[in-house]
Amino acid sequence: MTLEGQSLAELGKLFALFGGAMVLLYVLRLKRRRVQVPFSPLWSRVVVEKQASSLFRALKRIGSLLVQLAIVALVVLALGDPRVASFAGCTHEDEKPPPPRHALVVIDASASMATSEGGRTRLELARDKAREIVAKLAVHPSQRVMIVQLDARTRPLTLWTSDPQVLAAAVDAVAPGGALDAPTAIEDALRLAEDALRGREGGEVILVSDMAFDPIPEARRAALSLSVVQVGAATDNIGIEAFNVRPYPDDSLTYVAWYAVRNESARPVAATLFIYANPRGRSEPDFFEPARLVHAEPLTLPPGETVRAHIDELKFAGSRVAARLVVAAEDPLRDAFSRDDVAFAVVPERKTLKVQLVTEGNLFINAALFLRENVALTTRTPAEYRGPEGFDVTVVDAVPVDLERPGNYFVIAPRPGATFTATGVLEQPEVARVDKRHPLARHVSFADMNALETPVYATDRKDEVVVAAKGGAPLLFTRVIGDGEEARRYVVLSFDLRHSLLPMNYAFPILVVNAISWFWQDAEGLLQPNRAGVPLALGVPGTDPAPAVIGPDDTTATARRVGERVHFGASRLGIWEVVDPTAVGDDGEPAPPSAIAVNLLSPEESRIAPRAGDYAAPVAPELEPAEQNPWLADFWRVLLLMALGLVLVEWITWHRRVTI
């Protein structure tokens, strides 16, 4: 017999206390009452009989004491909750413990979980589902659970535990501020699950997610005993896939913005892309005010397609810009995912361009370049020319030089050779066609060129003819040969400026600026936007080992310095600033904060519809206790019944005057 309640020593103390009290009550002498009688001899015989039976009466009182002590012993022993292996020929076996189980509950908190459905986000629905799962698992005595948050990385929020309160608190702690603006690192979660469950019995993974990512391979599912609780359904969405802004490479306050907008719905959508500017803005409320609006671009988005374009002639103060995509009020589409409707950009500083002019002497082209504040001009003769290396643009003015090296060339009246082949000469060409949408034609009128003659150059299929004469002869065109660092890019003006009135027109210096700008119309010259939720690095000179990193709504991030770069992670969209109090500018004053734009810009997260996949649903364990005799399992009941039986015996014998 074993005791599950009080220990044997504690029971002995209790029995000694109550048993001693019982013995003390029995040994106390009764105080006899004095009674006056009329004639004492009548009572003498009664006294003699009482003395004769005193021994017998004493024995009866000892028996009563023993009964009372037995009652005390049974009650005290019942407090010890004794367990017996056998009793009265009956046997009892303790319940065998169930096999151990380990469930890794992974809750998706990535950007797509911010999708709103029925007035609640998918993350809120996922937390409700996770609470139900934890409640069902916690009833299993051998169940161990670990809660993990999934976004751009996996974050275990508990150790292996079966405490329902700890698990419930961990579920509530999953992205308490809402779904993070981060991609879904499902591969990282699967690797963590493999490590966490390795060598553990009854291991399984329960994923609570909208499953808005590529299906998990069947082999990985089987190896991890993966089951899925899916939240969310297919719904419409439009979003910004790309956004960036840069200044024109001239000395004006004009900017150009590139954007890509995706329509995930099955029908056309009317929308507007609004552009806002705020020199000190960081978060959405800092930008999205009517007074900050600098441009509104109406869009018609084809179903299932991405619209890519650019916006010219943006004018604003400062270097921080934000875009917001809004569905037209008359359009019936409901955009359920709002996090991809905003994007931010930091405009880079205007670059001073190194321009090389190769000429035998041309005051017009020299003046057009020399007067630009953002151009560092180097003039060379054909004999001094050594190639385009070290220059952003090389301007070749009607001289025969090598144009076969990688670089950017603005060629005026090129000499026929390997790069450009002339098929004839056109006298007094007249402008017949102008591609006014081309960047080279920005603010330029070619009506008054009045050239005497121009060679007719053969064009390739990929050449872009901006201005053509009658008969199709190209007067202004572009050509790109190769790609990457080995690319050769050309802007070609086919006629000699000295045989034209174009240099006398105000359009000529604008054409020169457009030609230089054309070489940076794509990615070059842009500050690339950064993805939320992934490690970022920003070049910040200084000595502070841990500069302050401040984001939207005064959010802070942990940063560390490695050399001249500061590494940190940003989980929210907006403009983040790195403030290093030790950094000093060129003027000796404290350097201003370094800014970085953080965006979602994730086509995968914008595809908020669940992907196809045949996933199993989780099954909660059912506890089936072994059948047993409750009276033998809880033997204290038997002891209390025995004590009650002795009380009944004592009562009967007392009333029958056996024990008195």
Image: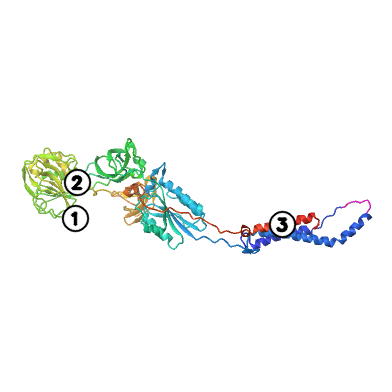
Dot 1 amino acid type? Glu
What range of the chain is rendered magenta? Answer: 34-40
> Do the CB atoms of the residues marked 1 and 3 lie less than 8 Å apart?
no
Which mark is drawn over residue 514?
none
- Real-space Cα separation, disc 1 to disc 3, in angstroms: 105 Å
Dot 1 alpha-carbon crowd within 10 angstroms: few under 14, some 14 to 19, many 20 or more: few
> For residue 486, which numbered disc appears in the image?
1
User: Where residue 427 appears, x then y in whole percent?
Assistant: 5, 42
In the displayed structure image, the side of residue 572 where residue 55 appears, left or right: right
Discs 1, 2 touching: Cβ within 8 Å: no
- Please say if the residues under marks 3 and 2 sit with CB atoms less than 8 Å apart: no
Mark found first going from the N terminus, 1 or 3: 1
Q: Is residue 113 visible?
A: yes
Q: What residue type is labelled 2?
A: Trp
Q: Which residue lies furthest to the front in this view?
A: 89
The amino acid sitting under disc 3 is Gly
Q: Which of 401 and 12 is in front in this view?
A: 12
| Residue 277 locus on image (x, y percent) | 31, 41
Q: Which of 162 and 381 is in front in this view?
A: 162
Look at the image and tell me whether residue 489 can be seen.
no
- Judge whether 267 appears above or below 541 on screen: above
Q: Residue 518 carries which label?
A: 2
Chain-order first, disc 1 or disc 2: 1
Q: Residue at (52%, 60%) from the top-left corner?
A: 98
Dot label at residue 645? 3
Secondary structure found at label 3:
helix
| Residue 421 picture location, percent across and down | 9, 50
